[in-house]
Image (tube, grey):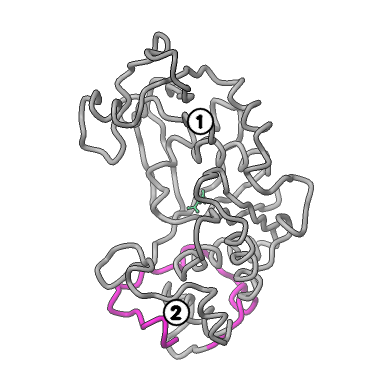
Amino acid sequence: MSVRGRYAPSPTGRLHLGNVRTALLAWLQVRARAGTFVLRIEDVDRGRSRAHFEQTLIDDLRWLGLEWDEGPERGGAHGPYRQSECSARYEAALAKLHTFACTCTRKEVRAAAASGSGVEPVYPGTCWRGPTHPERPSAVRWRPPEGVVSVSDARMGMLQEDLRAEAGSFLLRRRDGDWAYNLAVVVDDGFMEISHVLRGEDLWTSTPRHVALATALGLPVPQYTHVPLLRGPDGEKLSKRHGAPDVAALREAGEEPGRVVAWLARSVGLVSDSVRTVTAQALVGDFEVAAIVDRPRTGMVDPWRL
Ligand code: GLU
């Protein structure tokens, strides 16, 4: 079976070096196996997505030499490649699942949840027998089946989760009508026949939910690789707060793409510290995800001085 991988950014801001490092690794994984690379724009969050951010990220990826085979501006047999245009797919998926309408606000869920330990509280079941506030707009939730879901990952090993107990009934569509990322990502990876998902480690803990949904929808489960996030000196995910330049800023400042790619490659141990410029293409060779090293922050250099 041929390899199909993707990069699936949300156009809610400018790409930073951490984003494009994940894009580079996803691209390398596909190119090293002569596969098909898909760019999918994850603009389900209508309130935060902007067309100009989509254009900027397209320009950034091209500038870095990370061209895609299917996606915006290229088309392909698995389109549309913009989630805001894929509602019919998500509607069809919802129709296959036993879901329930939920009229609880976030605050109500948090207040009624048994434990407040996790980032997201476990849904207490308020609307299982019907919406408690029929006058309100309703969200759609899905109660995952009983049992433990096992997920394996090329770098993270194995994760087992009792979804009912640990994640509870989770959102597939929000009260404002927006589709939830967790549904859209599963439906699209299935529809686009994605065989390999490489993405940031922050999504690893959502993966059991994705596997349960894919299974319930009769979709194959892709091979997962979750890669380290680029972190600032304080250990937090690199962001504007750290003063790190975004990719467009480097591009606009006249930086050389080869130097940016070399910096990204050095930061995960793909090339030695003496390599100051390299093309993405030159890294393809026999790239293996096993070669990715999460380098200690002390080994990082200031992105303004590539
Ligand atoms: N759209 C998600 C993000 O920008 C990534 C989704 C994925 O790779 O599964 O964080």
Residue under the image location 41 percent in, 31 percent down: 149
Q: Label 2: which residue?
A: 266
Label ID, residue 268: none
Amino acid type of the residue tagged 1 in the rendering: Arg
Name the outermost residue toward the top.
129
* Quarter of the rendering containing residue 50: bottom right
In the depicted structure, whether residue 89 falls above or below residue 9: above
User: Front-most of 268 and 87?
Assistant: 87
Residue sitting at x 66%, y 62%: 33
SS assignment at label 1: strand
The answer to whether residue 268 is above or below residue 158 is below
Identify the amino acid type marked 2: Arg
Q: Which residues are magenta?
A: 277-306
- The tag earlier along the polypeptide, 1 or 2, is 1
Image coordinates of residue 197 in percent, x first then y, are 55, 51
Does the magenta portion include 3?
Answer: no
Instruction: Answer above or below: position of 15 versus 101.
Output: below
In the image as oriented, which residue stretches furthest toward the front? 135
Above or below — where is 76 with respect to 188? below
